[in-house]
Image (spheres, grey):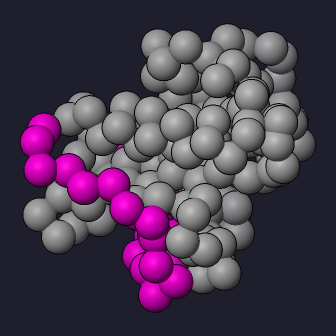
Amino acid sequence: MSGIRIRPAQPREAPALSALALRSKAHWGYDQAFLVACIDDLTVDPKDCDGERLIVAEFAGTLAGFAQLAGSPPAGELLNLWVDPAYMGHGIGRQLFETLCNLARSLGFRKLTIDSDPHAEAFYRHMGAIRIGEAQSTVDPERALPLLEITL
């Protein structure tokens, strides 16, 4: 899909980004109770829209996805990567991932970990990440998430 613009997130976009993350999570068929439990984890704080570590993908003036970097070099975390379901399958996730990895490299990061949703593990592996274990879900203590790592 051409015409995608990647840019820093703006604080005023935090509510729209939070809603986008929830729509993206819901796309995988989770029940309403689980989605409600995920709201805190999926809420973007306006202060995180610092002009550097949270980027958005925009298509035709519409927010299509976002990604967020956390941590301190040399090891960090891909904290969020969400694509609006209307734009899934059009390369937006790839563009966000590649842009975030380039940003991380420029800031001195050498590795990023990813606590992946099980439905997104194949995407991250396709992008070059390897599974290094499991991480406990912050929403359901009995749920294990794929823990991945990418070397930059």
Residue 39: x %, y % from top left: 63, 67
Residue at 37% x, 32% y is 94
Residue 3, compared with residue 123, is above or below; it is below
Residue 75, compared with residue 85, is above or below; it is above
Find out whether residue 90 is within the magenta segment.
no
In the drawing, does residue 134 fall left or right of residue 105?
right
Quadrant in the picture for residue 148 = top right
Q: Is residue 143 visible?
A: no
Residue 130, compared with residue 76, is above or below; it is above
Residue 109: x %, y % from top left: 74, 37
Residue at the bottom extreme, as displayed: 12
Residue at 64% x, 24% y is 152
Residue 64, compared with residue 92, is above or below; it is below
Residue at 30% x, 41% y is 92
Find out whether residue 16 is within the magenta segment.
yes
Q: Is residue 151 visible?
A: yes
In the drawing, does residue 94 fall left or right of residue 32?
left
Write the start and end of the magenta stretch as one range: 1-29
